[in-house]
Amino acid sequence: MSTTLLQSYLDRETDAATARHVGAHLDECHHCDRDARTFQQLRSSLTRHGGPDEAAVGRLHDFAHSLLRGGGDESAEKAPEPGA
Ligand SMILES: [Zn+2]
């Protein structure tokens, strides 16, 4: 499942049929389900603060994307992002 689709689902930007499809997949696929939970946790931690500084938000976004891209290896937090 693509990260873009997963994020659209979490943002409720997909149509109802797609949302059902993604939801059913998350029920069956532990990998995507874990990615979705990670993304939701990061987003809720941002939302709680209301107005976090942009540098911190950027770092969290990079971290979330590295998790989603890299399959969630917890040791990947120092992976550099050239040309961001
Ligand atoms: Zn999956």
Image: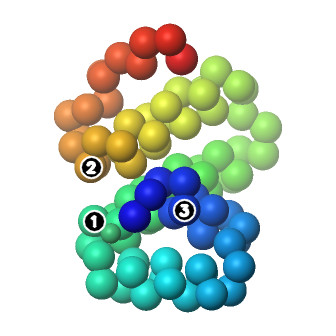
Q: Quadrant of the C terminus?
A: top right
Residue visible at 36% across and 43% down?
69
Quick one: SS at disc 1? Answer: helix
Q: Position of residue 2 (x, y in %)?
A: 44, 57
Q: Is residue 65 left or right of residue 45?
A: left
Q: Position of residue 31 (x, y in %)?
A: 28, 65
Q: Nearer the viewer, residue 72 or 15?
A: 15
CB atoms of marks 2 and 1 within 8 Å: yes
Instruction: Choose mark 1 or mark 3, whichever is in front.
Output: 3
Residue 71, numbered circle: 2
Quick one: SS at disc 2? Answer: loop
Marks 1/3: CA–CA distance: 14 Å
Q: Is residue 25 above or below residue 2?
A: below
Residue visible at 28% across and 48% down?
72
Is there any visible trace of residue 9 in the rendered image?
yes
Tell me which corner region of the image, top left, top right, bottom left or bottom right, holds residue 19: bottom right
Instruction: Give whichever of discs 2 and 3 has the lower sequence position.
Output: 3
Residue 31, numbered circle: 1
Instruction: Choose mark 2 or mark 3, whichever is in front.
Output: 3
> How many residues crowd around disc 2 within 10 Å: few (fewer than 14), some, or many (20 or more)?
some
Q: Amino acid at mark 3?
A: Leu
Q: Is residue 45 left or right of residue 69?
A: right
